[in-house]
Image (cartoon, rainbow, N blue to C red):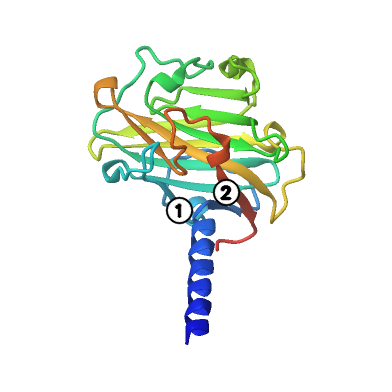
Amino acid sequence: MIGFVKTLVIVLLAAVRAVAADSAVVKSTYANEDVALQLDPGAPFWSASPSVYMEKDTFGKAVPRHRTEIRTRWTKENLYFLFICPYEELHLKPSPNTTQETNQLWNWDVAEVFVGADFSDIKRYKEFEVSPQGEWIDLDVNLHNPHHEDGWTWNSGFQVLARIDPQEHVWYAEMRIPWSAIDTRTPTPGNKLRLNLFRSQGPPEHAHEITWQPPFSKTFHVPERFGLLKLVKEKP
C-alpha cells in the first residue's frame, strides 16, 4: 500500500510539472502567406491562432481587470503578434510620432515582446514595443552592458499598427517582426525561442505592470524567468 501511495505521488508530481512546463510555452501557428497588419481579431489569419494571456503582475499577483490576450503566427519571413489590451485609464505620450522610433517609450502605455534565439547567452535578446497610439521602439538588449537601453539605435525593420476603442476600453496592437532580426536559423516547425511578454498600463499614480511569466523583480529584464515560443505547423 505504501509503495502504491509513493507511486501515485510521483505520478501526480510529474503531471503537475508537465502542466507547469506547458503553461510556459507559447505556440505560434504557421501561415502560408504574409498579410497586411489589420487589427481584426476575427480575421481568418488570427482565428487560426490559440490565445495566451498576460494576467499577473511582476511578482505573480493576479491582475484580472487587465487580463491581456496575445496571439502569434509565423511565416517563412516574419513573426506576428496581436495584443488585445483592456484598460481603465491610458497613459499616453503627448504629440506621438509614429514615423520614427520613440526612445523611452516604456515610460508610457505599451505592449512588449522580449525574444531571444541564443540559448547559450540568455542575456542577449531583442525587445519590441508598441503603444496604443502606434509609436514603437526596438532594442538589441545586451545585459552584459550596464546601459543596455543604448541598444535602441538598432533597427530591426519591424512594423506595428495600433488603435484604441474608447467605448469598450480596449486597445489593439499588432507587430510583424522579420526573422532576420531575431534568429539566424531558417524558421521551421519545432524551432524554439526564449520569450516573455509584458505590458505597462496607466499613469504613474495608478500604474500596473502586467506579465506573461512574472520576473519576480521590479525590472522586466530577468531572462532566467522567460518562457518559450515554439513554432508549430497547425493550431494545437
Residue 142 occupies which quadrant of the picture?
top right
Residue 103 point in image, percent of width and height:
50, 14
Dot 2 alpha-carbon crowd within 10 angstroms: few under 14, some 14 to 19, many 20 or more: many
Q: Which residue is mark 2?
A: 73
Q: Which residue is mark 1?
A: 51
Residue 193 point in image, percent of width and height:
65, 44
Please tell me which of labels 1 and 2 falls first in the chain: 1
Residue 75 point in image, percent of width and height:
65, 47
- Judged from the image, the secondary structure of the residue bearing numbered disc 2 is strand
Residue type, mark 2 in image? Arg
Name the one closer to the observer, 90 or 16: 16
Question: Which residue ends up furthest to the front in the rendered image?
Answer: 2
Residue at the (73%, 38%) spot, across then down: 120
Name the one closer to the observer, 169 or 52: 52
Decide if residue 22 is in sight here.
yes
Q: Is residue 153 left or right of residue 51?
A: right
